[in-house]
Image: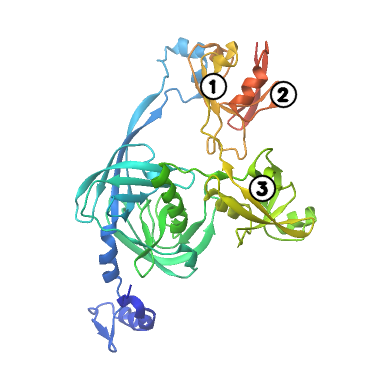
């Protein structure tokens, strides 16, 4: 698309001279050259960026103080039943129209996660009702749908072509100020580590991004979408010049699966990995200084069937170099069940290629009544601990999702949000293993993680 901004860099010196004369009106021309302006591109792109208002409710519980969990104190102080209540919530975000014909809008998962009602406001102040097509918390990408034929969509760039120093523009709804435009540059690429258990490969930018920008557009000077604004680093809640956007290539991969299945069906390789650093390379006598070191291979997994071994270093996926464990996790996490993947590995100093067929990722957490496991646990509900359910990295076990007041489970000391990690000193990672350990056992010795503490609970 031909654009009048093609000569922007040639005109920077002229624009600086104009800025020095602050009291004078800006001329239309300087030395025969038009003064550079983003206005033409913004006018073209802005109709594709929308404001999103979300109304919903979240579960809250009375008696957040742990002393209130003691049934004797509750009876003494005559506290009311602490069954979950719901609190109404309102929030605002942004979105990008990516399919005008079908009314599809790309946004963040966290913008619409608790939505019961969604209102989408267009540039001309038209208000439309929206509904969620699908949402993926691990990539923080969601797709919503509106019923309108009078929409304009945005075009996509290839985010793999983005470089540090590229000029970018952010458009969104910061602090409720609709269709606000800010500009800056790409400050860094491949940022991760903002949230445990998520798939992250952020574009970092100094274009002002504030609360309400989430789900909005990060575009290049051709008016093409390069990212979905997602997060900021801030002590105050406002912009500090460090914002993050999900690369559009990653968002499109998630988008395609949501539109096809209504959800993301990730393939699973079945390995535990960590980054190769110089220290790790020295400790394990590795011949490479980058890659993902395989620390464990799950029995029966795609990696196990393909012949991946503990101690292998994955250096590339389908020919694309892998510098660390995050890049490997992201690469596999964007693939589907049944996809074949070529892994370049280094084993005992020798290079080789292994082809694996990705299996199904972990199923949705199995939920059961604890009474089905042991009568001493009656009154509790349990499910397999899922990604993001705990702030403790790599914690495995069974999450206690609820405990009835005065029930056997409550009287034996079990609380909501406890994580059962061992039964009779044997580790468990899911509900099925808990059931197996407890089968026909007259008594159970549970090891429970509560916050940052670990305690033993005998169930007799």
Residue for point 44% across, 60% down = 241
- Could you say which disc has been placed on residue 388 in the image? none
Q: Nearer the viewer, residue 248 or 409?
A: 248
Q: Is residue 324 visible?
A: yes
Q: Helix or strand or loop: what does disc 1 sit on?
A: loop
Residue 386 figure quarter: top right
- Could you say which disc has been placed on residue 273 in the image? 3
Q: Spatial distance from mark 1 to mark 3, Cα to Cα? A: 33 Å
Q: Mark 1 sits on what residue? A: 415
Could you classify mark 3 by the number of other residues whose Cα lies within 10 Å: few (under 14), some (14-19), or many (20 or more)?
Answer: many
- Measured as percent of width and height from the top left, residue 372 is found at 56, 15
Q: Helix or strand or loop: what does disc 2 sit on?
A: loop
Do the numbered discs 1 and 3 sit on residues whose CB atoms are within 8 Å? no
Q: Mark 2 sits on what residue? A: 425
Q: Is residue 166 left or right of residue 448?
A: left
Q: Spatial distance from mark 2 to mark 1, Cα to Cα? A: 20 Å
Residue for point 59% across, 25% down = 431
Judged by depth in the image, the label closer to the viewer, 2 or 1, is 2
Q: Which of 167 and 240 is in front in this view?
A: 167
Q: Which of 166 and 27 is in front in this view?
A: 166
Q: In this view, does 245 lie to the left or right of 305?
A: left
Judged by depth in the image, the label closer to the viewer, 3 or 2, is 3
Residue 294, compared with residue 422, is above or below; it is: below
- Measured as percent of width and height from the top left, residue 82 is found at 42, 19
Residue for point 68% across, 13% down = 441
N-terminal of the two: label 3 or label 2? 3
Residue for point 54% across, 59% down = 190
- Measured as percent of width and height from the top left, residue 356 is found at 63, 49
Q: Helix or strand or loop: what does disc 3 sit on?
A: strand
Residue 62 figure quarter: top left
Q: Which of 302 and 249 is in front in this view?
A: 302
């Amino acid at each position: 698309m031909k654009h009048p901004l093609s000569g922007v860099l040639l005109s920077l010196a002229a624009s600086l001279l104009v800025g020095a004369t602050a009291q004078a009106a800006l001329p239309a021309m300087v030395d025969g050259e038009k003064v550079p302006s983003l206005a033409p591109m913004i006018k073209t792109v802005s109709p594709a960026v929308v404001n999103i208002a979300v109304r919903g409710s979240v579960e809250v519980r009375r008696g957040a103080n742990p002393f209130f969990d003691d049934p004797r104190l509750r009876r003494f102080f005559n506290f009311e039943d602490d069954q979950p209540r719901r609190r109404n919530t309102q929030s605002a975000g942004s979105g990008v129209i990516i399919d005008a014909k079908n009314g599809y809008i790309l946004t963040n998962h966290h913008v619409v996660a608790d939505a019961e009602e969604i209102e989408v406001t267009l540039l001309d102040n038209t208000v439309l009702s929206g509904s969620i097509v699908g949402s993926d918390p691990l990539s923080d990408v969601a797709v919503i749908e509106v019923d309108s034929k009078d929409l304009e969509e945005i075009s996509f760039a290839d985010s793999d072509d983005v470089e540090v120093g590229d000029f970018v523009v952010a458009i969104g709804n910061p602090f409720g100020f609709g269709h606000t435009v800010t500009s800056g540059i790409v400050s860094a690429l491949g940022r991760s580590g903002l949230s445990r258990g998520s798939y992250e490969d952020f574009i970092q930018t100094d274009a002002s991004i504030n609360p309400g920008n989430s789900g909005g557009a990060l575009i290049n000077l051709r008016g093409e979408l390069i990212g979905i604004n997602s997060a900021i680093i801030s002590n105050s809640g406002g912009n500090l010049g460090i914002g993050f956007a999900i690369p559009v290539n990653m968002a499109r991969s998630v988008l395609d699966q949501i539109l096809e299945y209504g959800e993301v069906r990730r393939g699973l390789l079945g390995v535990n990995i960590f980054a190769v650093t110089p220290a790790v390379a020295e400790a394990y006598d590795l011949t490479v200084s980058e890659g993902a070191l395989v620390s464990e291979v799950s029995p029966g997994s795609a990696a196990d069937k393909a012949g991946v071994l503990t101690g292998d270093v994955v250096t590339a996926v389908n020919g694309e170099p892998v510098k660390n464990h995050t890049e490997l996790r992201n690469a596999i996490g964007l693939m589907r069940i049944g996809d074949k993947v070529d892994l370049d590995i280094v084993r005992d100093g020798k290079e080789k290629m292994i082809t694996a067929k990705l299996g199904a990722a972990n199923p949705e957490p199995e939920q059961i009544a604890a009474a089905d496991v042991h009568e001493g646990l009656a009154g509790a509900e349990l499910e397999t601990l899922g990604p993001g359910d705990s702030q403790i990295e790599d914690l495995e076990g069974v999450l206690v999702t609820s405990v009835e007041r005065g029930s056997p489970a409550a009287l034996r000391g079990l609380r909501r949000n406890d994580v059962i990690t061992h039964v009779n000193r044997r580790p468990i990672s899911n509900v099925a293993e808990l059931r197996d350990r407890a089968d026909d056992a007259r008594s159970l010795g549970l090891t429970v993680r509560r916050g940052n503490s670990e305690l033993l609970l005998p169930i007799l």
